[in-house]
Amino acid sequence: MTHRIPHTQLTNWAGLAGAILIAVALPAQAGRLRAVHDNAEGGQTRVFGAAHAGEAGSAVRGSRVVTDGEGNVSATRGAAVQGAAGGSFRRGARNTRAADGSATHQSGMSATGAKGTIDSQGNATKDASGNVTQQRTTSATSSTTGNSVESTSSYNKDTGRTRTTTCFDSSGATITCPSGK
């Protein structure tokens, strides 16, 4: 169900957090909240939050989209999962699109489990002329060996795509990366 509420409520990050917290605080093991309202910028703000808890673990997610009535849009979303056996996953992203056609993207994720950890952060931009740049860094560590890998990739129209990958042993010394099959 969607509820229309006054623009003085749920207009910033607190709105997203509030939607998630309300969904988590519902007495059942699962809950959702959606809200839409006109904002002071002449557009709309939409928020969504959902949560679930059970024997296998718990999860929460939320999103917020804001328009300004002039063609600009901002969207933020995030999620977190906690497994009963200790594994976890978190992700978040923010996208913007301006009336002139330019856009940005930022995102990140992390996960931890019995086999190790992984983290990834990245961003991309597109200017009003359509030129794109991108960058992402990802690292992973094995819980068995302690060895890790870090990979960085980037893109722009002048150099194309580049990627650098480096592997480390458990003491942090550089080692030869295993070949993939």
Image (tube, rainbow, N blue to C red):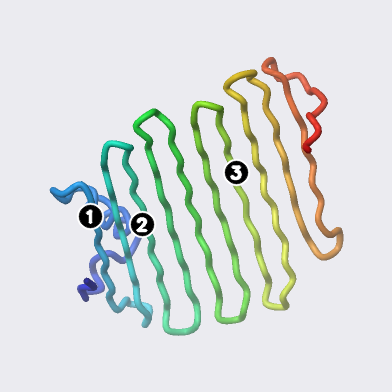
**Label of residue 31 in the image:** 1
Q: Is 65 or 85 nearer to us in this picture?
A: 85
**Label of residue 131 in the image:** none
Q: Earlier in the sequence, mark 3 or mark 1?
A: 1
The quarter holding residue 81 reads top left
Q: Earlier in the sequence, mark 2 or mark 3?
A: 2
- The reply to whether callout 2 and callout 3 are in contact (CB within 8 Å) is no
- Element at label 1: strand
Tell me if mark 3 has few (under 14), some (14-19) or many (20+) residues whose alpha carbon lies within 10 angstroms of its own: some
Amino acid, disc 2: Gly
- The reply to whether callout 1 and callout 2 are in contact (CB within 8 Å) is no
Q: Earlier in the sequence, mark 1 or mark 2?
A: 1
Position of 159 with respect to 112 (left or right) is right
Mark nearer the viewer, 1 or 2:
1
Residue 78 in the image: above or below residue 82: below
Residue beneath disc 2: 62
Residue beneath disc 3: 120
Q: Is 2 or 76 nearer to us in this picture?
A: 2
x%, y% of residue 87?
Answer: 43, 32
Amino acid, disc 1: Gly
Q: Residue at the far left: name it.
A: 27
Position of 25 with respect to 120 (left or right) is left
- The reply to whether callout 3 and callout 1 are in contact (CB within 8 Å) is no
The quarter holding residue 148 reads top right
For image coordinates 72% across by 67% down, the residue present is 132
In three-dimensional space, the C-alpha distance between marks 1 and 2, rounded to whole angstroms, equals 12 Å
- Element at label 3: strand
Q: Is 28 or 172 nearer to us in this picture?
A: 28
Mark nearer the viewer, 3 or 1:
1
x%, y% of residue 55?
Answer: 27, 36
Position of 23 with respect to 120 (left or right) is left
Amino acid, disc 3: Ser
